[in-house]
Image (cartoon, rainbow, N blue to C red):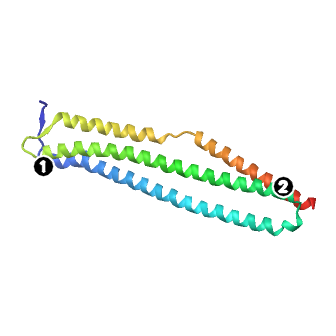
């Protein structure tokens, strides 16, 4: 059986401040940040989707108003490039936001599981400290270990590297090639007539 710890009322308050309330505040902050980020990503997705739909409408309207004065094969090729660029852009936006939401949910789930485990240990210690038997020193050591793991957990989540940024840039470059190809083809279709 492990040693038991007994604390006076003043020490109980100090214990709660040092190992309880600070972590509860951290949990609240982390949960709030994940929630705000998820909502932000959701609204960005809606806004960007609206912008893409608007662009599709403008391109379709502009292109078909001049259909009687263009060389048809270049026009069709140009519209095909532009439509491909728009579809590629929609795919890119979907991939970006889907992976962002998945990543946020995965990190949130990891942190929430960690906090649940920590709260269970803390609750047991707190209950024991408020009883005449005192708290198990082993439980307190487990709590300190979990707190050390908390620091490691948050430290490893920070570094994401630049691979994803490079991937986005290459995807956007493809969209620009579609835009350039479509614009040139439509310009040639007007000039060739």
The Cα atoms of the two marked residues, 1 and 2, are separated by 81 Å
Position above or below: 76 against 66: above
Per the image, label 2 sits on a secondary structure element best described as helix
* Local crowd size for mark 1, using a 10 Å CA cut-off: few (<14), some (14–19), many (≥20): few
Reading the image, the residue beneath label 1 is: 9
Residue 30 position, x and y percent, is 39, 51
Task: Give the residue at x 12% y 35%.
Answer: 4
Q: Residue at x 59, y 39 (%)?
A: 163
Please give the name of the residue rendered at 18% of the width and 50% of the height, measured from the top-left corner: 13
Task: Give the side of residue 52 with respect to residue 158, left or right.
Answer: right
Give the residue displayed 60% in from the left and 44% down from the top.
Answer: 165
Residue in front for this viewpoint, 118 or 102: 102
Pick out the residue farthest to the top.
Answer: 1
Percent x, y of residue 132? 6, 44
Residue reaching furthest to the right = 193
> Residue 75 location, x and y as percent?
83, 59
Camera-side residue of 152 and 193: 193
Residue 7, placed above or below residue 52: above
For the residues carrying marks 1 and 2, which lies nearer the camera in this image? Answer: 2
Q: Earlier in the sequence, mark 1 or mark 2?
A: 1
Work out which quarter of the rendered image holds the N terminus and state it: top left
Give coordinates of residue 26: x percent, y percent: 34, 50
**Up-down relation of residue 40 to residue 27 (above or below):** below
Q: Secondary structure at mark 1?
A: helix
Residue occupied by mark 2 = 185
């Amino acid at each position: 059986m492990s040693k038991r710890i007994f604390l006076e009322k003043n020490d109980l308050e100090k214990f709660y401040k040092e190992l309880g309330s600070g972590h509860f505040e951290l949990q609240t902050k982390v949960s709030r940040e994940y929630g705000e980020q998820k909502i932000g990503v959701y609204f960005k997705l809606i806004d960007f989707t609206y912008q893409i739909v608007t662009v599709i409408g403008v391109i379709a309207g502009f292109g078909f108003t001049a259909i009687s004065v263009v060389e048809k094969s270049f026009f069709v090729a140009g519209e095909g490039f532009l439509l491909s660029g728009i579809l590629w852009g929609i795919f890119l936006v979907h991939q970006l936001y889907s992976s962002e939401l998945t990543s946020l949910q995965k990190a949130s789930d990891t942190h929430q599981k960690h906090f649940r485990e920590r709260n269970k240990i803390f609750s047991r210690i707190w209950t024991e400290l408020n009883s005449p038997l005192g708290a198990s020193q082993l439980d307190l050591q487990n709590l300190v270990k979990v707190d050390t793991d908390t620091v490691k957990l948050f430290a490893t989540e920070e570094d994401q590297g630049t691979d994803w940024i490079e991937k986005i840039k290459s995807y956007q470059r493809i969209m620009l090639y579609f835009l350039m190809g479509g614009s040139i083809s439509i310009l040639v279709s007007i000039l060739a007539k």
